[in-house]
Amino acid sequence: MQKTALVIMAAGIGSRFGNGIKQLAPVGPEGEIIMDYSIHDALEAGFNKVVFIIRKDLEEEFRKVIGERIEKITEVEYAFQELDDLPEGFTRPQNRTKPWGTGQAVLAAKKVLDEPFVVINADDYYGKEAYVKVHDYLVQEQPADGRIHICMAGFRLGNTLSDNGSVTRGICNIENGQLTGVTETHDIFKTGTGAESRSGEEPKELNVKDLVSMNMWGLTPDFMETLYNGFVEFLDGLKPEEIKKEYLLPELVDQLIKTGRAQVDVLETKDTWFGVTYQEDKETVMKAFQDLTDKGVYPKGLYR
């Protein structure tokens, strides 16, 4: 069986959620956290290794809440996203306190990844279909045409909205099943008829069937070298006034597409995404997992 890994970005603490580490908040009927369901779905789809990207100061609590449990059922590795973990020749600016972004987060796992992998956010629930599609893609042989071949799970906009406030979504531009670009769209609200963006002077109605990126990428070990080189370029070009600028995975992917260095296949999933963006979302998420359990989608007590 080919080795494939689930890489979970769990180094952040969500400020909009309020106090506490939202990635570790119990939401399932028996105290499960969102990551429990992500890992369950990924293993079911064929992934056979889990890599947690966390902050070093969260390690003890993280292992206690989920790590030790998962280590009993599959191979587990830990990677640490740290402000001072920079390529040789670079040092952290003295007044830099903001994390370097998702690009650096994934790069932190370079030493523990030798296999194709899917990257997800720790506090997002993606459903089962996306893991199956991404896994099937990663174990297929891709054309040897000099380009990087990677994939992205595309979710229908209408399946990613919050009842409790606005969201920002990257709406995908797609041609022949391939990503050509992403339009970052802010202040998206759910409405009685669908969705609209209120970021401009006038509300703009959006197509709820448009696919959006929820930061679920299917990547390869070779991609890590490109990710590293991109980080060097990012740091080289960083200006003193850009002290909060982040090295973001979607921005690198967009650059690779536009320069013809990568082909990104978009794999559509009709599953509903949900996450705890706002404190008020937690009740909705808990009800959703209870319903999924009642319907038999998940067993009572995931790892019993």
Image (cartoon, helix red, strand yellow):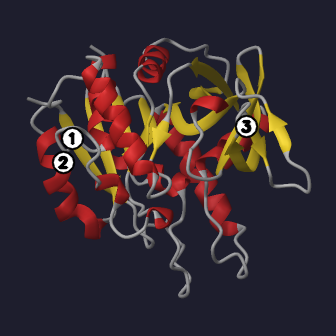
Q: Earlier in the sequence, mark 2 or mark 3?
A: 2
Can I make out residue 94 in this image?
A: yes
Please give the residue where the numbered disc 2 appears in the rendered image. Answer: 67
CA neighbours of label 2 inside 10 A, class few (<14), some (14 to 19), many (20+): some
Badge number at residue 195:
3
Q: For the residues marked 2 and 3, what is the alpha-carbon distance in whole angstroms?
A: 38 Å
Badge number at residue 285:
none
Whether tag 2 and tag 1 are in contact, CB under 8 A, the answer is yes
Is 120 on the left-hand or right-hand side of 148?
left
**Quadrant, the C terminus:** top left
**Residue that lies at the very extreme toward the bottom in this rendered image:** 94
Residue 210: where, in percent of width, then height? Answer: 72, 27
**Residue that lies at the very extreme toward the right in this rendered image:** 201
Residue 32: where, in percent of width, then height? Answer: 22, 42
CA neighbours of label 1 inside 10 A, class few (<14), some (14 to 19), many (20+): some
Give the camera-side residue of 69 and 285. Answer: 285
Whether tag 3 and tag 1 are in contact, CB under 8 A, the answer is no
Residue 187: where, in percent of width, then height? Answer: 72, 53
Kind of residue at disc 2: Gly
Please give the residue where the numbered disc 1 appears in the rendered image. Answer: 76
Kind of residue at disc 3: Ala
The residue at the point 66 percent across, 32 percent down is 157
